[in-house]
Image (tube, rainbow, N blue to C red):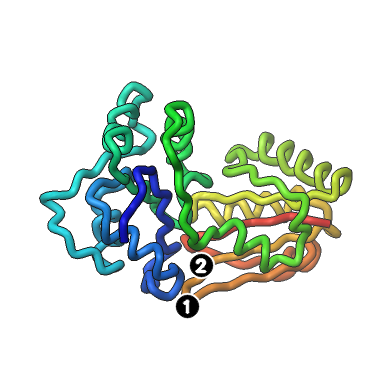
Amino acid sequence: MKLKNALYLIPVTLGDEEPALVLPASVFQVIGELDEFIVENERTARRFLRKSGYTQNFDTVKFHLLNKHTQPEELAPFLDSVKDGKAVGLLSEAGVPCIADPGAVVVQLCHQHSLRVIPLTGPSSLLLALMASGFNGQNFAFHGYLPIQKPELRQKLRELEAGIYQKDQTQIFIETPYRNDKLIDGILSYCQPQTQLCIAADITLDTEWISTRRIAWWRQHQPSLHKRPAVFLLYK
């Protein structure tokens, strides 16, 4: 497979499932031809590549680290190879790149330099959760992480509910897994009893669990997610 000189946005699995179960063959074809990647964590990126059948010697592969410690002035060299006519792959830590992921800054830089960006098909926990929620899929908003402190969380949830009832808009957000149960406490304390909450945990994994109920029901059947990755959605 001959690759174009472009930045390829490469999706990865959402957990430890076999890549072939959730990714199309075209993704593996692209991966196999690349020898330069932009990644958030080199160790986990290498592990995903090997599970995907990548056979190249890692000693000959170039990895650029893109995480919260990366400074803006460090980004330009990431794209030198694309400017020289090669292909570079951008990997997320989980799911698709650039959605709740630092990769967006590199894509923006590509567009500023008129470099081609090619997104590949793969699992997005946000879209899969929305699909399975039964909520409005034509008008929705993703808010990333909500405030941790109770007063700020209460105010934010009131704003989200206003969006639900005034705009007919599904509200989507996530949390660091170890804080899931604390977030659920806040949702059940501050949201109206008739509001619907969908919890989508371990999406695409064997332990996947997705349930949509009204807040009043959840208050009587509060789950404990422990450290399971989850997406939360609110709607009327």
Residue 188 placement: quadrant: bottom right
Identify the residue position indicated by label 2 in the image: 202
Q: How many marks?
A: 2
Q: Which mark is residue 123?
A: none
Identify the residue position indicated by label 1 in the image: 206
Provide the secondary structure element on which disc 1 rests. loop
Q: Is residue 178 visible?
A: no
Residue 80, given in percent of the width and then of the height, sits at: 28, 32
**Which residue corresponds to the image point at 51% horizontal and 67% vertical from the top-left?**
202
In this view, the residue in front, 233 or 140, is 140
Callouts 2 and 1 close, C-beta under 8 Å = yes
In this view, the residue in front, 145 or 50, is 50
Crowdedness near tag 1: few (<14), some (14–19) or many (≥20) residues, C-alpha within 10 Å:
few
Q: Quadrant of the N terminus?
A: bottom left
**Which residue corresponds to the image point at 24% horizontal and 53% vertical from the top-left?**
43
Crowdedness near tag 2: few (<14), some (14–19) or many (≥20) residues, C-alpha within 10 Å:
some
Q: Is residue 62 above or below residue 207?
A: above
**Which residue corresponds to the image point at 65% horizontal and 40% vertical from the top-left?**
150
**Which residue corresponds to the image point at 32% horizontal and 45% vertical from the top-left?**
88
